[in-house]
Image (cartoon, rainbow, N blue to C red):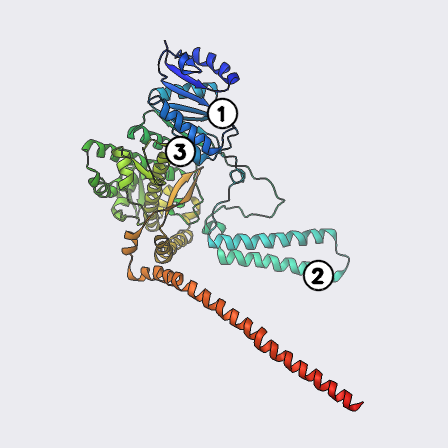
Amino acid sequence: MGQRILLLAEPLLAEALIPLLEQSDQTYAVGTAPDRLDGPPELVLWCVDGAFDTPALWREAHRLHDLWQPAPLLISLPAAAPWPQAQLLTLPAEGLLQAPTAETLLATLRTVINGGREVQLSARSEPEANQPPAGPTLGLGQWLLVSGLQQIEADLSLCERMLQAGPSHPVALLLLLGRRRELRAARALLHLLWGPLSLAWGPVAVPVPVAPQRKPEMADDGTVISLSQRNAEGTWAAICERLRQRIGAELNNRSGQLLALEGLQPQRRSDLLLALLEHLTLLRQQLRREHQQPDQLAEQWLRLQEDMRRQALRHMASPYVQLPQEGSLRPVAETMLGRCDLSGIDPELPDPQAMLAALVLDQPLLVGGQLLAPDAPLALLHLEQLVANWLVRSAEQLSAQVLACCAAWPELRRYLLVPELLSTRNLERLRNQLNAQQRWSSWLQRPVAIYESRRQLLTIEAGAITVRQQTEPRDQDLRQLSWAQQLVPLALETRDALAPQLHSLIQSIGRLVVILLTQVIGRAIGLVGRGIVQGMGRSLRASQ
């Protein structure tokens, strides 16, 4: 007798699924009611229709999960699921499929019965999910150059069309020719001021106004989570697999800020991120072997950060490559490691204690006010964001050091950097922009974010580096700010404290002005007018 499955579905759907399950390789014993099975079910398969609202779906899923424990619950959803994806991920189900095929359903049954977890949700169907993605983030120089060139190109196109039509008056012809010369001179001046478009980062092609077209949507496979084991090992394997798939593609910058990582060649960029992920896997295995106490994980993690960055940089640069410098061949990796300062730590990295406790010790994780097991979908996605944030920020720190080495070693630029940075002017401009951005963030943006309890996580999603805002208490970071940085939160606190009183004062002054204008000045003007009218009347009667 095969493994027992309790099937909860509409009669027609159940009649189609029972032969499929019973004739599969596993030879399941399927029943549509508990009394039709020879024992308690080993798995509950619930095929949901669209008649449930979100609260009813959540209550029924919890009822089935509690009723048939320890049997896992597998929920199959329709293709046009009307429920929010964030709510679906909170359902107490070991399997969650949306419009699965027969092969997917059978494979998920095997995974869930063997103690794993499977989540496959289609891309969202909300209107905002169907909108085409925004273009790459524009820097200040790129925005000024692109916007100016777009306006100039539009006016030039109009002038050319009018010239081709043939102006009827000689004066109109002279005006159009002068306007065309003026626009061409303005375009040359923009190029002179802001340089090539590549200096400010972004697409090399200059956008020219064209007729509106529907942009192709970015491929989005929705949420797909597959765990062979519902423990820390299975969770880490799923996170690594998801990140490797995203890192393998060419990453665009949609973070809203300039990144030194963009200066590396796409292949070097992927190699660096994958090397960091590989060494993070080795570090996690080392921490599990050493059986570290929870309070010692963060200390050991911080102590090994510099060594991980050194190994990742050596792997990216390749330890066997030699390039000429000052007439002699030098090993690239060792020379760079001797010049780079890898001891710094990004202050925007969150406390690693919660992440390490979940991934190393398999402890619950606090997500959205709930303690969840690391293999729960919401917890796994949160851990993935934390790991991706560490990868991107560590790669950004290493990329900044690589740019500094390339500034002093011109031959290294062809090996590691994008072609646009072969020019010394382009490279130095990028480094200056990065330094200015870092100072602006350190002195203004970071104190504001800390005071507002916000943390910016750099994640890898849909072929791009994006930003996720996370709200968490940051009182300790606030106390660690320098006195100059603390002036920014103090100014915000002063504004918050004085704004209500100032608003009330302005309202009171406004009401007082209204009273003066209507009750005092208005009445006085009325009395004066009435006196004038009465005086004119008496004068008129006297004259008669």
The residue shown at (19%, 36%) is 292
Whether pointer 1 and pointer 3 mark residues with C-beta atoms closer than 8 Å, the reply is: no
Q: Quadrant of the C terminus?
A: bottom right
Categorize mark 1 by other alpha carbons within 10 Å: few (<14), some (14-19), many (20+): some
Considering depth in this image, is 97 or 67 the residue closer to the camera? Answer: 67
The residue shown at (45%, 30%) is 57
Amino acid type assigned to the residue bearing label 3 in the image: Thr
Spatial CA span between label 1 and label 3: 19 Å
Q: Is residue 311 above or below residue 492?
A: above
Picture coordinates of residue 142, whole percent (x, y): 49, 52
The residue shown at (40%, 11%) is 27
Tell me: 70 left or right of 539: left
**Residue at the outermost bottom position:** 543
Residue assigned mark 3: 90
Amino acid type assigned to the residue bearing label 2 in the image: Leu
Picture coordinates of residue 214, whole percent (x, y): 59, 39
Residue 117 visible in the current orientation: no
Categorize mark 3 by other alpha carbons within 10 Å: few (<14), some (14-19), many (20+): some
Amino acid type assigned to the residue bearing label 1 in the image: Ala
- For marks 3 and 2, the one nearer the N-term is 3
Considering depth in this image, is 371 or 308 the residue closer to the camera? Answer: 371
Which mark identifies residue 45?
none
Spatial CA span between label 3 and label 2: 70 Å
- For marks 1 and 3, the one nearer the N-term is 3
Which mark identifies residue 174?
2
Picture coordinates of residue 307, whole percent (x, y): 24, 41
Spatial CA span between label 2 and label 1: 67 Å
Q: Is residue 442 above or below residue 520?
A: above
Say which element carries label 3. loop
Tell me: 399 left or right of 84: left
Residue assigned mark 1: 99
Say which element carries label 2. helix
